[in-house]
Image: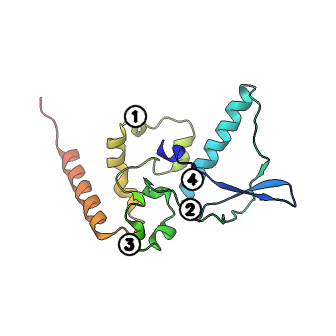
Amino acid sequence: MRILRSINSHSDDEKDFKKDKYIIKELKYQSQEATIFMHWVDAEIKKVLGENGTRLQQRIQEEPPQGIPSSCNWVSKGLPIYFYDPGWYNNCTQVQKVGLADTRNVAFLLDVSSSIKGNQDPNEMFDSQKFSKKYLYLKIQKYKLPEDMVQEVESEDSENKINSSREDID
């Protein structure tokens, strides 16, 4: 939900005066998974409003066939790490990385398209803490985290493996 609440995490659109439309542009720091998810959210909102007979008071937008980078230079902070493009994140300095991403929580399944197809994945029934523990280590490997964050994530993953290998005896 934090991704949806953060208005800066949504795609950017900029006015094209020649076409008299707003061209949807991609945020340079947003991962492909996050882009897929945000486009799905936008489409669902339009669909629901259309079904309810609600008049859409939106600007006329056009999504180009190939992504055009946005000229915006602000960055949403505190979102799950894989919201950020790994290449972009890895090019940040160690100082920039501190406080930028939430390295403890996960919001999507490994295949983001599974999250949006409407098929209920059994893992989505977990509370967010269990869900994050299950998928975080798998997602985070593409990112070059500051050393203290790497140790923290690895120690949490080791603890998860130990806990998952134990059986409860009643």
Which quadrant would residue 17 be assigned to in this image?
bottom right
Q: Residue furthest right?
A: 18
**Residue to which mark 3 is pinned:** 94
- Of mark 4 and mark 2, the one earlier in the sequence is 4
User: What residue does disc 2 label?
Assistant: 74
Label 2 residue SS: loop
**Mark 3 residue type:** Gln
The alpha-carbon separation of the residues under discs 2 and 1 comes to: 34 Å
Residue 56 in percent (x, y) is at: 75, 35
Q: Residues within 10 Å of mark 4 (few under 14, many from 20)?
A: some
Crowd band around label 1 with a 10 angstrom C-alpha radius: few (<14), some (14–19), many (20+): few
Structural crowding at the residue carrying mark 3, measured as other residues with C-alpha within 10 Å and reported as few (<14), some (14–19) or many (≥20): few
Q: Secondary structure at mark 3?
A: helix
Task: Find residue 55 and report its image quarter.
Answer: top right
Q: Which residue is mark 4?
A: 8
Amino acid marked by disc 1: Met
Distance between the Cα atoms at labels 3 and 2? 18 Å
Of label 3 and label 2, which has the lower sequence position? 2
Q: Residues within 10 Å of mark 2 (few under 14, many from 20)?
A: few
The three-letter amino acid code for the residue at tag 4 is Asn
Residues under numbered marks 3 and 4 in contact, where contact means CB atoms less than 8 Å apart? no
Q: Is residue 167 above or below residue 93?
A: above
Q: Quadrant of the C terminus?
A: top left
Q: Report the Cα–Cα distance between label 3 and label 1.
A: 35 Å
Residue beneath label 1, please? 125
| Relative depth, front residue between 113 and 74 | 74
